[in-house]
Image (tube, rainbow, N blue to C red):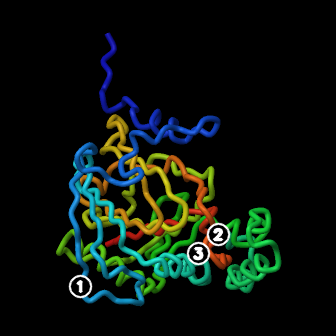
Amino acid sequence: MEIFNNQDVDNFTPVFKFYKQKKVDPSLEDVLGYPTFDSKNENVKKFEFHPKNVDASLGLSDTEWNVVHLNSVPGLYVMTNIFTNDGVKNWSKRCLESYSKNPNKTNLDHVLSEEEKNTIWQRSSLSFQQHEKDSISALKSTPVWKLRWSTLGYHHNWDTKIYDTGTKLDFPTDLERLCSVLTGAISSEAFKSQAAIVNYYHVGSTLCAHVDNSEHNLVPPVISLSFGLPAIFLIGGKTKATRPSAVYLPSGCAVIMSGPARLAYHAVAKILPEDGPLPTNCDAIDMFLRHTRININVRQVF
C-alpha cells in the first residue's frame, strides 16, 4: 500500500485558483480585513501604535496606526492608516520616477537606452497630459505601462534566485528610514534595508505561491508596502499543505512577515479593480494608481 506524506498535499493552489478566477468574481466573504478587520470574527489581534517624532518627509500619518496580527499566521502583521494621502502619492512617485532609473535594474533594461530609461516617467507623464486624462487607452500607450519590476540595493536575479553580492548599489535612504520606523512598531530589533524589489501589478496580474528564502540571513522580517489598487494576498505555512489565509491589502498598507511568517508560502492571487470616483484634478500618478498596484518588498540580505 502506498503511503502519502501529508506535506505533499497541496492545499494552497486551490485557494489561489479560486481567487485568481476571472470569469466569475470570487466571493470576498472569507477575506480577512475586507473591508476592515474584525477582531471578534477573524481570529486576529488588533492594537494601536502611536508614532513619535514622525518625519514628515516620509509621508507618515501622525495619528494612531492600526496594527493587526493574524493569529492563524504567527508573525504576520498588517498595518493600515500609516500614510497620509500625500504620502501614498509621493512614495508612488518615487517608484515611478526615481526607482526606475539607473543604476537600478528593471525588466526594461534590454529594450531601453540609458536616456530612455532615465526619462521613462517624464515621457509617460507628458504623453498622458496630451491625451484624455480619464482614458485607460492613453495610459496603456505610455512607456511606463510596460514596467514590471525594478530592484534596489543588492540585485536579485529572477532566474537563479541569487543576489548579486558583488555589486552593491546605494539603498535609498528615505526608504531605509521608513522601514526602520515600521519595524520599530512591532519589534525593538534593528532592521537593515539592503535590497528591495518594486513590483508594478496591473489588473489581471498575479504572483504564484513562493517562499522568500534567497537571503543569506533569514531571521530579519520582510517588509511589504502597497500603493494603488487593493490586492488579495494569500499566506499559509512552511509547506503548501497548509491552507492559506486570504488577506485584503488596501492602498497605503504595510505587511511585516516575521517569525514563522518569514518563511511561509505566500502569493498575490488577485488585483481588485477600483470603481470609485477619480480624485479631483486627477494627474498622471492618480491615473496610474487607478489601474495599478505598486508593491515595494524590502529585505535584509545579510
Q: Which residue is mark 2?
A: 288
Left or right for 117, reference 235:
right
Which one is nearer the viewer's eye here, 50 or 223?
50
The secondary structure type at the circle numbered 2 is: helix
- Which residue is depicted at the point 25% across and 80% down? 51
Pointers 3 and 2 in contact (C-beta within 8 Å)? no
Residue 252 lies in what quarter of the image?
bottom left
Residue 230 image point, x, y percent: 50, 58
Residue 135 image point, x, y percent: 77, 65
Q: Alpha-carbon distance for marks 2 and 1?
A: 32 Å
Circle nearer the N terminus (2, 1): 1
Pointers 3 and 1 in contact (C-beta within 8 Å)? no
Q: Is residue 141 above or below residue 31?
A: below
- Three-letter residue code for mark 2: Phe
Residue 105 badge = 3
Q: Which residue is mark 1?
A: 52
Residue 45 image point, x, y percent: 21, 54
